[in-house]
Amino acid sequence: MSMFCFQCQETCRNSGCTVQGMCGKKAETANLQDELIQALKMVVLTRKPSAELGLFVVQSLFMTITNANFDDAKLTARVAAAKRLLNGGRITAPLGVQSSENPDVRSLRELLTYGLKGVAAYADHAAVLGRTDQAIYDFIFRALAAAATETDAAKLTALVLECGQTAVSAMALLDAANTGRFGNPETTEVKTGVGDRPGILISGHDLLDLKELLDQTADAGVDVYTHSEMLAANSYPAFKKYPHLHGNYGGAWHRQNVEFAAFNGPILMTTNCITPVQDSYRNRIFTTGMAGYPGVPHIADRKPGGVKDFSAIIALAKRCPPPTELENGRLIGGFAHNQVLALADKVVDAVRSGAIRRFVVMAGCDGRHKSREYYTEVAKKLPKDTVILTAGCAKYRYNKLELGKIGGIPRLLDAGQCNDSYSLTLIALKLKDAFGLDDVNKLPLSFDIAWYEQKAVAVLLALLALGFKNIRLGPTLPAFLSPGVAGVLVETFGIRPITVPEDDIAAMMNGD
């Protein structure tokens, strides 16, 4: 085999990609990512986690997330930078997934590593907004060192759960960074149609990039549209003052070949979720941050106290025709923890009266597999006295359905981006207190979540760390879970695969 990678849900035959990644990365790119992880392990084995070095490791881990960076030149430079930090030391670390022969040790090491990648992404998002937590860097160093050297399954399992606790801290840090800078999200109707002016499409997760782009396009005669997980930006008060933030265009990340082609104007990828770039839009896509793709112009990081320079994107937009309309409707979002908890009394009354019989968390990632139609069918077939809680791009499987309301409460409450799964946990914990329960699992609450990449792994570990059990996970269980490790997760936490919509709905409505 020329490579081996099984970190995402779409890995070949749910076993591992050995020739080319299903995500589109070449074997050379996959092997460079392995080299970067190896170099980072050597760094954390020899260096202490200063703030500067912690951010370097966090951003380097982020570069290896699925669909984040396909640029071999950037990865090569990052490997070289990491090795320079060793100062010529002779420390070694395992190279590649298969360096661990014991299947359970290998599984736990990779589960820990992928959780760390998700934590790193959220920590980097927060750092962009000036929020850091040294304790997060400390744990990442300690856990990544263990992923290189530890062979005791019990100790690795404990670190996996601690990774979940750290994921909670990272998402809380990011939540504070976002709301502190842009305000608390509010219930908002977002347009999905298009205007008659040229447009710029912004995708990914970075809200500061959006703000700086909006500031620089204020008098440029172009509109700005959000895409995929950036939909959530429309619900923040700080962005509502920009009349040229036109609305949202398109859906989940995997439809870029269709949606980016139809948009006609320039596209800015701010973080992960970029797919192999197609000729139909190759000459008008840009990357920034940790995202990268060979041959695609990259917008440089902002200098201290400065802003990014989006002038090249704006100049190109002025020469492009307006977007081709894909749809013309509205999406409702903004149901993060502050907004939902403002409705807490109404929600509690609806549950006590029987108007709301159950909440179903359907957060997570979308993907290409036809099997993901399962989530659309679940949303359609759930009883009318259930409320769906969602976050992340999984929502595009059902957020355009007419699901109605219960006593004025929408049956679909969209908290925002994948990191806003933190909001859903806060809502559940507050409801536990409101009902006077001693265990969050006694709530009328079920989890039926979708995963794709390593941010979702961090979210899953966060749920386990907070004590949530009986989580349905699909469309497949991760390939990196050995039978032994999967068995422990099933026995200890009740994690189980999805089956068919009707059976899973019946089980969830019975509290199973």
Image: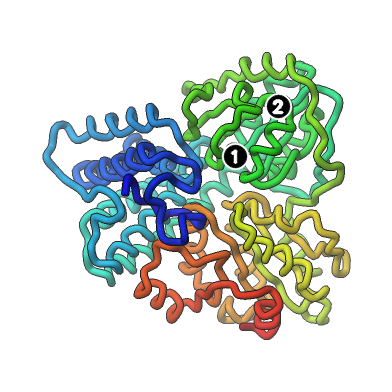
* Amino acid under disc 2: Ile
Who's the residue at 61% across and 81% down the image? 442
SS type, badge 1:
loop
* Amino acid under disc 1: Gly
Who's the residue at 31% across and 40% down the image? 36
Tell me residue 269's x, y (percent). Answer: 58, 33
In the figure, is residue 63 to the left or right of 498? left
Which residue bears the numbered disc 2?
Answer: 200
Q: Is residue 360 above or below residue 199?
A: below
Which residue bears the numbered disc 1?
Answer: 204
SS type, badge 2:
strand
The answer to whether mark 2 and mark 1 are in CB contact below 8 A is no
Q: Is residue 360 above or below residue 480?
A: below
Q: Is residue 146 visible?
A: yes
Tell me residue 431's x, y (percent). Answer: 67, 71
Front residue of 226 and 338 = 226
- Quarter of the image with the C terminus is bottom right
